Image (tube, rainbow, N blue to C red):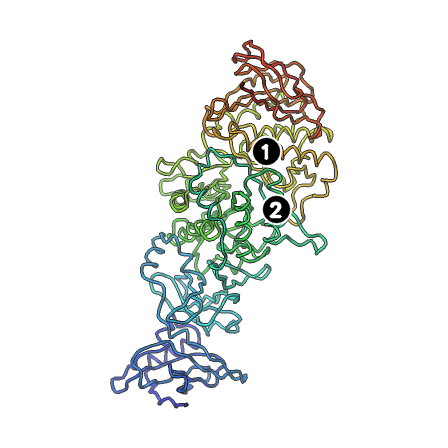
Amino acid sequence: MIIQSKKIDTSNTRIDNQIKKIITGVEPDPFHVLGAHHHPSGSEKGIIVRTFIPGAKAVSVLDLDPDKKISAQMLLPDGFFEALLPDKQEIFPYRLQVDFKNSQRATFYDCYSFTPILTEFDFHLFNQGDHDQIYEKLGAHPLTHQGINGFLFAVWAPSASRVSVIGDFNQWNGLRHQMRNRGTSGIWELFIPHLGTGQIYKFEVRTQTGDLLIKSDPYAFFFEKRPKSASITYDLRNFEWTDHDWMKERAERESLSQPMAIYEVHLGSWRRRFEQGNRWLSYREAAEELIAYVKEMGFNAIEFMPMAEHPFDASWGYQVTGFYAPTSRFGTPDDFMYLVDSCHAADLTVILDWVPAHFPKDAHGLEYFDGTHLYEHSDPRQGLHQDWDTLIFNYGRNEVKNFLVANALFWLDKYHIDGLRIDAVASMIYLDYSRKEGEWIPNCYGGRENLEAIEFIKTLNSKVYKAFPGAITIAEESTAWPGVTSPVHLGGLGFMFKWNMGWMHDMLTFMSKDSIHRRFHMDNLTFALLYAFHENFILPLSHDEVVHGKGALLSKMPGDDWQKFANLRLLFGYMYGEPGKKILFMGGEFGQWHEWDHDQALQWDLLQYEPHKKLQHFVKDLNKVYLAEPAMHEFDFDPKGFEWIDFRDTDASIISFIRRGNDPDQILLFIFNFTSVPRMQYRIGAPLSGYYREILNSDATCYGGSNIGLEGGIMADNHPWHGQPCLLNLNIPPLGMLILKPIRD
């Protein structure tokens, strides 16, 4: 039965003005006008329903009784309708039946008939920067509200005059789904009934000056594949994790004493499908191929270069626009969960590069989000990263700090990531980073330290370790800032590990020298040991050193091809011998000749040649020894785990040292010859008498070497040497390293 709505007096000037604001999109709070409201007149009883549906020619309100509907009046031809439900005193979700001018009919619940969802407590925590699960509130979330399924959209835009949800579902019309203004919180929200997953959407933001900005959702879980930039509704709750045992064991793990051999991967260029247009591997394909390869090679951790959504391939993921979404290049969020879950099933730790230092200027992103410098500083001396032409987060703003801290927790929570490697920490903590005099603003004490960024970092690390025991954070910090890996309560930044960038630079400088000249540069080789225990270091040979004209690791090595491969084995051996966890960028393990290209796969075809295959074999065995020998990792950050034997023979360019484990019987000797001259019957001090087994020789024939060594082992002489009680007479291979292990009866 169709009932014509009783004519409503619309002569109220205030209401009339609000209607005009609705249809022109300038009303800051549409819920004051649209939806169901008690009749303002004392002589009339009932509920007034107002709706604005551009393109509609007729609207009826469907009561809870499906056989009864009330036809609404069209107040303005733009699509504004009003109906009176005279018998109703309670406001409830109701349906609208809409006939459009294009002869289409649709029936749906009115989004303006629903009550607010976010609470004052949510706003309080967010505005003070302490809502650790804000990703459960802001963004787009599937839920059942007042008995109806749909999606809640919420966004922070405190200076906007109006915000709307736009998408295919409303023909990208910003007048159709204008959001509810939640007052001083700066948050806008709207529950859209019926909406499901897979819907493309953005926010239309009207600024105080009347400009319209079309923005992606800062908290979106999924995005269109670039170059498109719309957000996509997604439900993260459906994946069934199988890594319960892994997560339980991780929470009890003592990472500082555990081995960590990390394989650094850029997923878009690790391997490609040449026969299918040189396409990337998907997350699920990587779960099969990458994991199998990493396990075969003996690494026990994978570090992925940034996987959050980014529009520009050549940024390698370091210019993020979708901080809460794994990139759609390789699949869906569930697909990425599958990759992480598969890593855990294979006992592989997953580390994710995370980029809180800056963000790009893409128009759909965070820049000038609500018509003001919301996420970034307004002054370019604080807000512009000159090296990358990107924007710097305003860490002093509570809501921005909350956005970033919660983002770190999000990856550990929703994707079971085991660790975060924080990029460009130095650029965060120094106000004058890469700036000349006059190009930066001192802090309130006149110093160069970014106090807000430092506080953010401390808060981040404190919350990570409290919420996720066993998780790790790693700083890429290139200066001598003290206490990077000291606990926050002791005045440190609170990271668990720090990349030793100085070691990487010094080692590559040293190894690039012709071996005949290395005796003049031995300080480059040994300097890092002067500060090796000041921080919890990871020794990196990372992507940064094989791009932008720097050449591949193999091409950096001096000499002919034989010497280049020998030198690279020597470099890897020295890295694994020194105290500190290890990280190697993909391609280095088999001696790629070309420097890394993000648009091309690694040079896998090189493995048909013996030198590359044998280098790969060496890295595999080096990892095997590293994982098996406690002396190589238990005391990485304690001086009692390391002892020099000799580093003074600069003419021969030979150094030797001892690594010790917690068990007194866990002792290894490392001997390195950095020249191309074999040293026969060379004397090295030894801490114990008895037999020393050669557990690794980088010059073995199976690795491409000349097979000079100890033929399996050697007996020590009871003769003091190098301050040790015993002596070994060794044949030390050219450009080679030996690892010896005393064998107790």
Residue where numbered disc 1 is placed = 624
Closer to viewer: mark 1 or mark 2: 1
Residue 417, placed above or below residue 33 = above
Mark 1–mark 2 Cα distance, whole angstroms, equals 18 Å
Q: Amino acid at mark 2?
A: Leu
Left or right of 4: which side holds 677?
right
Residue 225 placement (x, y as % from top left): 58, 60
Q: Quadrant of the N terminus?
A: bottom left
Quadrant for the C terminus in the image = top right
Of residues 555 and 472, the one drawn nearer to the viewer in this rendering: 472
Compared with residue 676, is residue 113 higher up or lower down, i.e. above or below? below
Check residue 290 in the rendering and tell me which mark sits there, or answer none: 2
Numbered disc 1: secondary structure: helix
Q: Can the viewer see residue 34 in this picture? A: no
Q: Is 217 on the left-hand or right-hand side of 619?
A: left
Residue 164 point in image, percent of width and height: 45, 69
Residue at point 43% right, 79% down?
Answer: 52
Give the class, few, some or many, for how many residues have Cα within 10 Å of label 1's Cα (few <14, many ≥20).
some
- Judge by depth and name the residue closer to the eye, 394 or 674: 674
